[in-house]
Image (cartoon, rainbow, N blue to C red):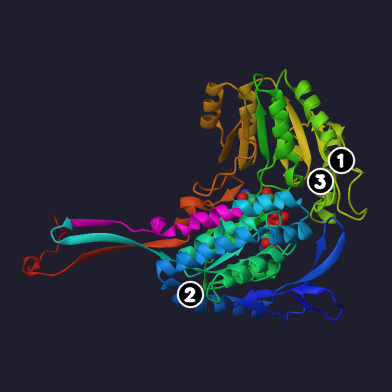
Amino acid sequence: MTDTTENQPIVHHWVDGAEYLSTSGRTAPVYDPALGVVTKQVALADQAEIDAVVASAKAAFPGWRDTSITRRQQVLFTFRELLASRKAELADILTSEHGKVLSDALGEITRGLEVVELATGFPHLIKGEYSENVSTGVDVYSLRQPLGVVGVISPFNFPAMVPMWFFPIAIAAGNTVVLKPSEKDPSAANWLAELFTEAGLPDGVLNVLHGDKVAVDGLLEHPDVKSISFVGSTPIAQYIYETAAKNGKRVQALGGAKNHMLVLPDADLDLTADAAINAGFGSAGERCMAISVVVAVEPVADELIEKITQRMAGLKTGDGRRNCDMGPLVTEAHRDKVAGYIDIAATDGATVVVDGRGIEVDGAAEGFWLGPTLLDNVPVTSRAYTEEIFGPVLSVVRVSSYEEGVALINNGAFGNGTAIFTNDGGAARRFQNEIEVGMIGINVPIPVPVAYYSFGGFKDSIFGSNKAYGVHGFDFFTREKAVTSRWLDPSHGGINLGFPQN
Ligand code: NAD
């Protein structure tokens, strides 16, 4: 970071293994959400800067692609060690720009580290295949090769983890990366890129381009960018998918969510209430795998709501650097939008059981606060039910049967995550078969797959069929060549215009 004349630091781009000072003249404010003040500015790229960053990644590609597997693996191992030993530094950055409590910031980094660890095993995951004698004296084999320069565009809610869903795998496979992080919390990306440089990553292999729609569109249209990996809200994900595809790029675009927890009457309601609290209010509900709707199969709703309400009374909201359970929302505008859904729900006939507006907090009065909120009897026609809220608002919808609950979930626009709480193994098994959602928890409220499985939902939660990380990640960041080979000898002589028969 470099000081401006007004002494407000600017987060600049990271290119060719060093800070790259923006000259675009455009910046956006970065807040400390718990203090409610602007602490720095982030550079917003113009076309010249987009071109410069992509050119750097393009120039680095041939050298990195041809770097031995052993050397690439050593750099990844060193990055893994550095990140594991210095994650507290990164957690401080996450909390100061996103607002999530420090323990949650550390959890985010740990989940990102899992993908780095998976990426260290890349030689096994990008191996080709070999078939000897497919025809007499003819062999066929496949090679998995990198794409070239790949673009990664990430959301505000996981400024470290979501980029790490992609760049470790892309880099392991031999690609070079341009990462465009959210302008709301941009510093984590620079910190990670600098750490990777320290680990021995050659200059230009991982670059950070800061910006807004101009930077995103620049990557979508740039002929030297071969793929786009996007995570963010559904309307933008759809736009990214369509625009990248129109420009001939490989694209994976993960969108928003509205995750339901189906509670059957035989569930342990104490454990279910604990899970609903953790999954509803962790990270102030700003998780794409947060539970935002509890679907209670009667007669459990009243008892479950009582247990959830009791637990909510013990939650401490405040500055993530203090000993709190839940931090602020990321910006004032987002806080106001989320709070607006409480009005919408009430107007549409829901009961506001616990109202998080005006909550007392352990933090500065100017912070972007909204306390945990519980709504009951939310009409499924209300925008508070149909739209993603992305804040600490948990809605309860009452149904009379398992079938009604499943139909409700399957009728929703999103299909990211869901969970069933029950002690009935048969019901859980039926649920995993019938539910139209990509990631399912059985008595697990936030079923984010571990790194060696892949992450992604259905319907409006993903555009295209490429999920993040796991085997899907290696497939996405490589392309396959099939080679048919023979070493000529006299037996191959003669003219034959047909397909070989043996
Ligand atoms: P967002 O869609 O506003 O922004 C995501 C990225 O797109 C950012 O880098 C932003 O700069 C860029 N962007 C924003 N508006 C744009 C525009 N008009 N044109 C081009 N680019 C644009 O999302 P957000 O608010 O940062 O993140 C929260 C959203 O992300 C939620 O909807 C959440 O569910 C979703 N999310 C999904 C997953 C998943 O895996 N499915 C994971 C995390 C977050």
CB under 8 Å between callouts 1 and 3?
no
CB under 8 Å between callouts 1 and 2?
no
> SS for tag 2?
helix
Camera-side residue of 88 and 417: 88
In the picture shown, does residue 438 fall above or below 309? below
Give the amino acid type for the residue marked by disc 2 in the picture: Phe
Residue under label 1: 356
Q: Is residue 43 visible?
A: yes
In the picture shown, does residue 301 fall above or below 141? above
Compare marks 1 and 2 and give the one earlier in the sequence. 2
Write the residue at 77% across / 37% down: 394
Query: Disc 1 vs disc 3: which is toward the camera?
Result: 3
Give the amino acid type for the residue marked by disc 3 in the picture: Cys
Camera-side residue of 400 and 137: 137
Write the residue at 64% across / 74% down: 14
Q: Quadrant of residue 5?
A: bottom right
Residue under label 3: 324
Ligand 1 location (quadrant): bottom right
The span picked out in magenta is 112-133
Q: Quadrant of residue 53?
A: bottom right
Q: Give the CA separation, mark 1 to mark 2.
A: 50 Å
